[in-house]
Image (tube, grey):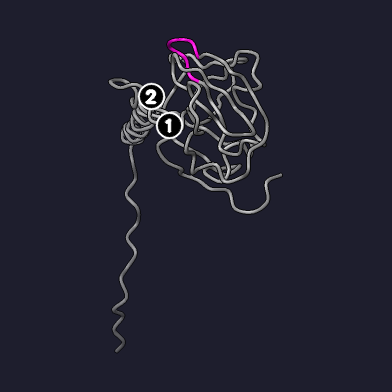
Amino acid sequence: MSSDNSPKKLPAPKMSKAEIKREVMEWVLVLEIAVVIAVVVNMFLLVNAVIPSKSMEPTIMTGDRIFGNRLAYKNKDPKRGDIVIFKFPDDERELFIKRIIGMPGETLEVKDGRVYIDGADMPLDEPYVKVDPVGDYGPVTIPEGCYFMMGDNRNESADSRFWIHPFLQRDKILGKAAFRYYRKVGPIK
């Protein structure tokens, strides 16, 4: 006598056409809700940016992906040193990410690669600039409601110093850089 203790496979229950239709409709509803949530998050909470160049290195590396907080400046103004994602003033179809260096109403000048505000004797303290910057620019007075943007990698950054429209209007800021969610490993091609 042999006893077979292995479980017996039961045949899968047959689903009626109405049950299949209900199952499909449930999945369609789940997908629709997911799409609506993604659209709302993208339009009102987060802005996504892919870093295409070396302009913010080593703070943000080429190929990194960053989320920006769209609500960061809802109840407060941007500050010097904030990294923001914005519509490029010379072509608003492009998104840029840079650091706010000059504030509304200030006079900014770059001498020997160092930034001076309102004729100060000492340059800005910028510990995030890791290369010895070169070049001169200005002086320029930043209009009210506008900002002067620069990359951390000053010698490799196409920033306010080189734009046709050098000042970023506040309403073109999409969000403050919040966190990196992806870092590309390996050479950038």
Asked which quadrant contains residue 90, the reply is: top right
Which residue is located at x 34 percent, y 33 percent?
30
Which quadrant of the figure contains the C terminus? top right
Q: Kindly identify which numbered label has been placed on residue 78.
A: 2
Depth check: give the residue in front, 45 or 75: 75
Q: Please check the rendered image and state whether residue 155 is part of the magenta-colored stretch, yes or no.
A: no
Give percent across and percent down for residue 172. 47, 16
Q: Residue furthest front?
A: 121
Residue 31 placement, left or right of 59: left
Asked which quadrant contains residue 151, the reply is: top right
Q: Please say if the residues under marks 2 and 1 sit with CB atoms less than 8 Å apart.
A: yes
Whether residue 173 is visible here, answered yes or no, is: yes
Q: Which residues are magenta?
A: 142-147
Figure check: 64 above or below 48? below
Q: Please check the rendered image and state whether residue 144 is part of the magenta-colored stretch, yes or no.
A: yes
Q: Kindly identify which numbered label has been placed on residue 82.
A: 1
Which residue is located at x 36 percent, y 34 percent?
27
Q: Kindly identify which numbered label has been placed on residue 138.
A: none
Mark 2 Cα-neighbour bin, 10 Å: few <14, some 14–19, many ≥20: some
Residue 28 placement, left or right of 98: left
Q: Which amino acid type corresponds to the residue marked 2 in the rendered image?
A: Pro
Which residue is located at x 63 percent, y 23 percent?
137
Magenta stretch: helix, strand or loop mostly: loop
